Amino acid sequence: MSLAPYRRKRDFSRTPEPRGAGGTAKAGAKAAADDAAFVIQKHAARRLHYDLRLELDGVLKSWAVTRGPSLDPADKRLAVEVEDHPLDYGAFEGTIPKGEYGGGTVIVWDRGTWRPLGDPHKGLAKGHLEFALHGEKLQGRWHLVRMAPRAREKRVNWLLIKGDDEAARPGEAAAVVEAQPLSVKTGRAIEEVAGEAPGWSSQAGGPLPGAKAAEAPRQGRSKNKAQAKAEVKSQAKTRAKTPAKAPATSGELPRKAAQARRASSAAKKSTASRPPAADGDPQDLPGARKAALPDFVPPMLASLAAAAPKGAGYVHEIKFDGYRILARIADGTVRLLTRGGLDWTGKFGTALPAALAGLPAHAALIDGEVVVETASGASDFSALQQDLSEGRADRFVFYAFDLLHLDGADLRAVPLVARKARLQRLLAGAPAPLRFSAPFSDDGALVLAHACRLSLEGIVSKRADGRYRSGRSRDWIKAKCSACQEFVVAGFTPSSVSDDAIGALVLGVYEEGRLVPAGRVGTGFSAAVARDLFKTLSALATPKSPFAAPLPADAARHARFVRPDKVAEVEFRGFTADGRLRHASFRGLREDKPAKDVVREMPTQKSDKPPRRTVPLTHPDRLYWPEAGITKEGLADYWIEAFRLAAPHMVGRPLALLRCPEGIEGERFFQKHLWQGANRHIVAVHDPKDKAGAALVSIDSLDGLLGLVQAAALEIHPWGSTLADWEAPDRIVMDLDPDASVPWETTIAAAREIAQRLKDAGLVPFVKTTGGKGLHVVAPLVPKARWPEVKAFAKAMADAMAADSPDLFVATIAKAKRRGRILIDYLRNQRGATAVAPYSPRARAGAPVSMPLAWDELGPEIGPAYFTVGNTPVRLAALAADPWAAFAAAAAPLPAGATRAKRRAGV
């Protein structure tokens, strides 16, 4: 492999690009290994593109990806093979002069290491290179597939395709290049670099690698090859982040929450050269006193309350779902300490401690929470547990919310707002793993209501003038959207579908030193977690029950007891009258709290009786969504919560079902006809136009819906008409199906445009997410118009929007015409067609739900798959009113006459 083509195309007296050492790399001299580097450079030349470069045999094999990488496995991005580049090129960021080959601006968009899955040389020769990326933005499996050459075509074209794995983001998350536009090296946008002289970097304070001394001020110095290569090989500090989860209403609340969760991407500087923060002496703060940095301070803990405190004396913060950690910094040495004082620095990888070591402080003690955020943007304790158990360290984020000590000053007596202000300045410009937990001064009840509507865990309200006091205090009040606390694991029941997995955990709490039962938790386990728990708990087996009193026969059935050493975090909906958990979901084992400290945090609800199911479930612990840990019983519990709101949109209608008998990873099929052996609560109905045909499926009660759950119906798609009149639809459904490259904000704007057109036609629009990648705008109808009229109206509206904005909308199904556009699918409005029901789950990773929204909730904070089977019950419990409560009352007749319909639709 030779660098001769690379050098022939460049005049190194003009371009700052590195020439590269040597001339020809020997094949096999440095084949890709676990530490081989990759880089993706964003390159604004004649056309903006992204250059993928993989280290192999001493050079960077290179492809120009025209639209950049996509996280959607369905996307196939054109990647044009270009000449090999020198390894030094991996650190290049700057401006190539106009007139030179590739003239334009270059930033380092992503970097990290890559690993071929198989022999890379054979893969390149064969035309299919499969590999894994471990970058700061891109992760997981990828494919480069060579396309068949066309006649007289000189270039070699490949396709870059994301592998279908846990790092894939079908649909809505495909546009990672838009969501993550900045340089991972300097934190700059490409426009900021474009304004600099070729080869010069104001961010780095000197010339970029390869720039000549004459092209930049004298104090700058180019990096040598070894430094540049080491920089390219630096491991990922964090995964690409999705839009943050924040209260989504009008006003300042969503904006401030988004700011609180936005990571700074400034370049990490040397810790040795960093001075203390230039904010004045921290000892000058009111209440500060001179003191040495303590080894450890027991953290301040919040007291649980049913509601947020009232009054202007409090500030409120989002309650995170992770591990409470004190970060101790002493002259560049960082220790991460649990709330019990355990040193967990080694558990969180290298990026997080390095980021803390880079803060402008010689000594500091920072209180915060380490979390892992999922695709929805919310912290997820189960995901954190999984990453810790797998030794994965690229997704850890430290939300800092208090500052106890800074550079010789004990700040615990300083008022909270002053401590947080100094902390915010300390974190300004910090790298991605560090974020400031911003406070809200709005009314606490309002902040809590918004948090719950968005299915967050809750909020913590803190006295604005309060001191930091170790231990539990009423100065900090936590109000939760759903019950969540720790329980002692006293035993387990084996799975009914696997020989080496648990089916449920037997739980308890301590009361006056005695372990008393608290019920079971049988959902929330992924298949892997269920197996790990079986192995872990089997090693703790004991023949004697650890409870202070014998269990009732039903509670002891199939139970295998263990030593009460382990602590589980469980989310639930309350306690029954006898102190047992209701609707419990496992979150993970906790290692930072001794079992003896576990007590009941919420009072037993004496008047609350658990709902009873009359439909038996066979194999209730069968995993329907293995990764999310949602079982058949978990889905049944979900529908018990959601049925009251979903019923008007699915009861008494013909239904189409997506059935997955072995869960989403097994066989799946659509079914609209009743099957032999169907549950007796499922209703058989006959199409009036096909009376001799097979019966169709319908339900008339919650029992019928639970019968569908037993039959593994994971998705429910009703007709747009009821059994009372099959030929007269009672709704119009306009389905917005965006191409993967369309930003979510554009889809929102499209929904609002459809809503306005429906209003102009005299109809009332409602909106819901699809649980996929788009939105449904739905208008209720007085059921008088027939199917052909409704379809004509919907088609006229779709055609009008496509005619008015042909670059944005398309009304044809052909995929070739949908690239970069939103398909307005009007075909949901014809006889026999269906649309996913409000509140129906989808058979997709994460168990997303099609969620009805109020129009003022629709914003960038809520993505199309934001709500899930796991978090929807929290939202439903927090809703003051059903956002679609007025749906039936808002029904209006379809505008009469085709001409009038077209005119009102905007044609």
Image: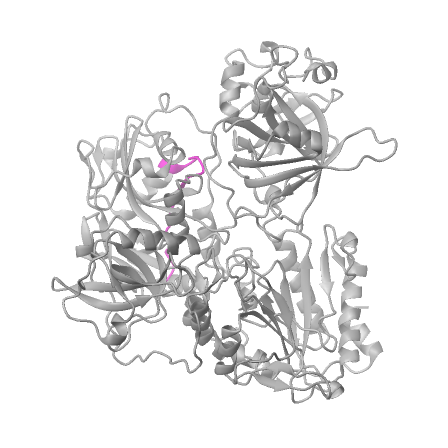
Q: Is residue 446 above or below residue 332?
A: below
The reply to whether the magenta stretch includes residue 441 is: yes
Task: Give how far across and how far down residue 828 sits, in percent.
Answer: 71, 71
- Whether residue 281 sits left or right of residue 382 in the image: it is left
Q: Is residue 287 visible?
A: yes
Q: Which residues are magenta?
A: 426-443
Q: Identify the residue at the far left of this view.
A: 512
Q: Is residue 44 visible?
A: no
Q: Is residue 111 above or below residue 557?
A: above
Task: Give how far across and how far down residue 543 sits, in percent.
Answer: 19, 61
In the rendered image, which quarter contains the N terminus? top right
Image quadrant assignment for residue 600: bottom left
In the rendered image, which quarter contains the C terminus? bottom right
- Whether residue 357 sits left or right of residue 595 in the image: it is right
Q: Residue at x 38, y 37 (%)?
A: 427
Task: Give how far across and how far down residue 598 sits, in percent.
Answer: 21, 58
Task: Give how far across and how far down residue 549 sits, in percent.
Answer: 15, 70
- Whether residue 38 sits left or right of residue 469 in the image: it is right
The reply to whether the magenta stretch includes residue 219 is: no
In this picture the colour scheme is one colour
